[in-house]
């Protein structure tokens, strides 16, 4: 017989708990502003990792606003259990970082978005010293901003994500570095702009996006790490990554033998 649908608040929670047999509920931060391949991949990867670790949970995706995203570093105060983010010393000090790079290092490989009228500015650039003559934009609280500044690259910090694309498209900023795995979806979202990828030139620095787990749940963090390692060893990790991103990476405007990679130091990783 099907269970009765209980609608009274407290009883409804009891019913849900009863029929899930006490499985641990895990609240995961989900960006409210954008849902793209990157977010979908991270959600699926997390689910699979916990399954491979034989760690049963009931995952609840909790939409968070842009302002709330900035507060995620204080997981203990949010009621959330997991978020994913680029690593930084401050973030690692305030939550448990599962130190397996979820994008295999590609988050630190950055194409340069620019306006069509500014593409010529990048012709012949082969050194960081030359790139220092141009202006970049990044989020004011992004780890990338500190990394670029540390390497002497002029970078304008902004808090408005969409404004970064707009200013670059209008030519008021020379370039906006975006990762190999997210730039194509962002170009689709900004299809009416004048944005293009600078061909045969990119910057890179060592970094990683990790799952961060609230400090009160070390067993959960250990299960995620265990599941991810199992996926790596079986080849499932690479296969899932390729399913989501191989096509986009291979479509970047890079000609073999003619690509310049400008390597940055990252003292924060």
Image (cartoon, rainbow, N blue to C red):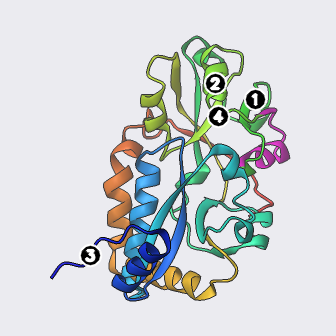
Name the residue beneath numbered marker 1: 130
Of circles 4 and 3, the one toward us is 3
Q: Is residue 84 above or below residue 223?
A: above
Question: Can you give x and y, in whole percent of width and height, for residue 92 in the image?
Answer: 74, 70
- Residues marked 1 and 4 touching at CB (< 8 Å): no
Name the residue beneath numbered marker 3: 4
Most foreground residue, 60 or 86: 60
Most foreground residue, 133 or 76: 76
Badge 3: how crowded within 10 Å, few (<14), some, or many (20+)? Answer: few
Name the residue beneath numbered marker 4: 161
Q: Assign the C terminus to one quadrant of the image.
A: bottom right
Circle on res. 124: 2
Specify the segment rendered in magenta.
144-157
Mark 3 to mark 2 CA distance (whole Å): 71 Å
Mark 1 to mark 3 CA distance (whole Å): 70 Å
Badge 2: how crowded within 10 Å, few (<14), some, or many (20+)? Answer: few
Residue 99, image quadrant: bottom right
At numbered mark 3, what does the secondary structure look like: helix, strand or loop? loop
Question: Can you give x and y, in whole percent of width and height, for residue 264 in the image?
Answer: 72, 49
Of circles 2 and 4, the one toward us is 4
- Who's the residue at 66% across and 26% down the image? 163
Question: Can you give x and y, in whole percent of width and height, for residue 34 in the image?
Answer: 50, 42
- Residues marked 1 and 2 touching at CB (< 8 Å): yes
Tell me which label, 1 or 3, sits earlier in the chain. 3
Q: Residue furthest top?
A: 117
Tell me which label, 3 or 2, sits earlier in the chain. 3
Mark 1 to mark 4 CA distance (whole Å): 26 Å
At numbered mark 1, what does the secondary structure look like: helix, strand or loop? helix
């Amino acid at each position: 017989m099907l269970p009765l649908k209980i609608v009274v608040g407290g009883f409804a929670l009891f019913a849900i708990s009863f029929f899930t047999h006490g499985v641990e509920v895990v609240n995961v931060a989900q960006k409210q502003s954008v849902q793209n391949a990157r977010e979908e991949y991270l959600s699926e990867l997390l689910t699979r990792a916990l399954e491979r670790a034989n760690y049963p949970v009931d995952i609840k995706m909790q939409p968070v606003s842009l302002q709330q995203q900035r507060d995620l570093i204080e997981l203990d105060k949010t009621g959330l259990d997991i978020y994913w983010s680029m690593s930084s010393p401050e973030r690692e000090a305030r939550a448990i970082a599962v130190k397996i790079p979820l994008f295999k290092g590609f988050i630190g490989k950055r194409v340069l978005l620019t306006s069509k009228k500014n593409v010529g500015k990048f012709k012949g650039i082969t050194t960081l010293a030359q790139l220092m003559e141009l202006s970049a934009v990044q989020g004011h609280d992004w780890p990338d901003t500190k990394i670029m500044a540390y390497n002497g690259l002029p970078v304008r910090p902004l808090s408005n994500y969409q404004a970064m694309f707009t200013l670059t498209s209008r030519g008021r900023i020379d370039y906006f570095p975006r990762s190999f795995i997210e730039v194509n979806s962002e170009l689709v979202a900004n299809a009416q702009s004048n944005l293009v990828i600078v061909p045969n030139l990119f910057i890179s620095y060592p970094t990683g996006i990790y799952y961060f787990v609230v400090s009160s749940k070390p067993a959960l963090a250990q299960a995620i790490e265990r599941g991810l390692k199992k996926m790596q060893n079986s080849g499932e990790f690479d296969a899932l990554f390729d399913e989501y991103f191989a096509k986009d990476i291979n479509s970047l405007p890079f000609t073999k033998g003619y690509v310049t990679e400008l390597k940055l130091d990252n003292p924060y990783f």
